[in-house]
Image: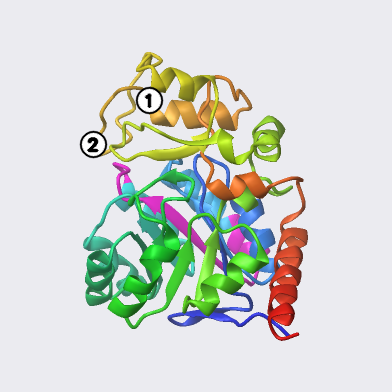
Amino acid sequence: MELPTLTIGARTARLPIIQGGMAVRISLGPLATAVADAGGIGLIAGSGLSPAELAEEVRRTRAATSGVIGVNIMVAVRIFKDLVHAALAEGVDLVVAGAGFSRDVFTWCREAGVEFVPIVGSARVARLAEKFGASAVVVEGCDAGGHLGTDRHLFDLLPEILDAVDIPVIAAGGLATGADIKRALDAGAAGVQMGSVFAATVESSAPDAFKQMYVAATADDIIVTRSPVGLPGRAITSPLTERIARADYPPIERCRACLKQCGKEYCIIDALEIAQRGDVDRGLIFAGTSAAHVHDIPTAAELIDRLCAEWRAASEGEHS
């Protein structure tokens, strides 16, 4: 018994597993390569990189694997267009985008022959995405890590999105195990996107202190915090999130104008970069509720093998 393949437009992956694109500098080329080699779809997070840096990551990844690779870029990033075009020029298979909605990106991807997959949080936006030419949509519930576009849980949203569109629907937000994958596929999803469980793999570009926060986290440690992006964000509790809860924001030392709109309570890019450098006291550690299920740091291939075995066990148990 094997998991089904996942076809998005003209691209087909052997497994219906997309590794989430986690910024800043958490999911880069090494992780995307490892996931693609293992049969899933590997995503490089473009937010927080320069166009030249993203192009180099894609170039190296494209050269290293024949699997399916893509990028994830926040629409809210000021240089969104430049990042998308940098990725398209280097031959990505798909572009995933959330934290906003851009009509232009549909045209850019169509002209480049690249699949575009927006992240949606409602049936209305899913229908709009299909109308503009999306190859698939990711429906992300409120248990996801990072910026949240909805306050509803995945399995509440999923039936509405499935009814609203005819293109493949990818389930995301709070998925941690092969049994979770089975539940999503049984509900009608074509595949799943999983981020947090891949953040704590060997190939993730997160530092060890960051990964150990995932390993140690319990369900009570994963909270919703305020972000200057204008959306709530799900993260692991830390001295920084405690400061944010008190509105005791760290001062902005320099503004890079990285976002199209910013509340300027604190610098989100600084907070994420600080965490990526290993300072988990002053940095922001985005994570979904699935981080509570992370108890070790496997390779990406080992994690995927584990997920497949768990899916198989859940499937066989149902028929025993």
Tell me which numbered mark, 1 or 2, is placed earlier along the sequence.
Answer: 2
Above/below status of 104 relative to 184 = above
Q: Quadrant of the C terminus?
A: bottom right
Above/below status of 232 relative to 184 = above
Q: Quadrant of residue 19?
A: bottom right
Q: Is residue 160 visible?
A: yes
Percent position (x, y) of residue 179?
64, 68
Residue that mark 1 sits on = 267
Percent position (x, y) of residue 115?
40, 72
* Residue drawn at x 56%, y 51% as measured from the top left: 57
Residue that mark 2 sits on = 261
Q: Nearer the viewer, residue 244 or 284?
A: 244
Q: Nearer the viewer, residue 65 or 241?
A: 241
* Residue drawn at x 24%, y 39% as measured from the top left: 260
What amino acid does circle 1 point to? Cys
Q: Quadrant of residue 141?
A: bottom left
Q: In whole angstroms, how far apart are the C-alphas of marks 1 and 2?
A: 12 Å
How is the structure coloured here?
A: rainbow
Percent position (x, y) of residue 117?
39, 67
What secondary structure is marked by label 1? loop
* Residue drawn at x 36%, y 77% as measured from the top left: 162
What secondary structure is marked by label 2? loop
Q: Residues within 10 Å of mark 1 (few under 14, many from 20)?
A: many
What amino acid does circle 2 point to? Gln
The segment highlighted magenta reads 60-79
Q: Quadrant of the N terminus?
A: bottom right
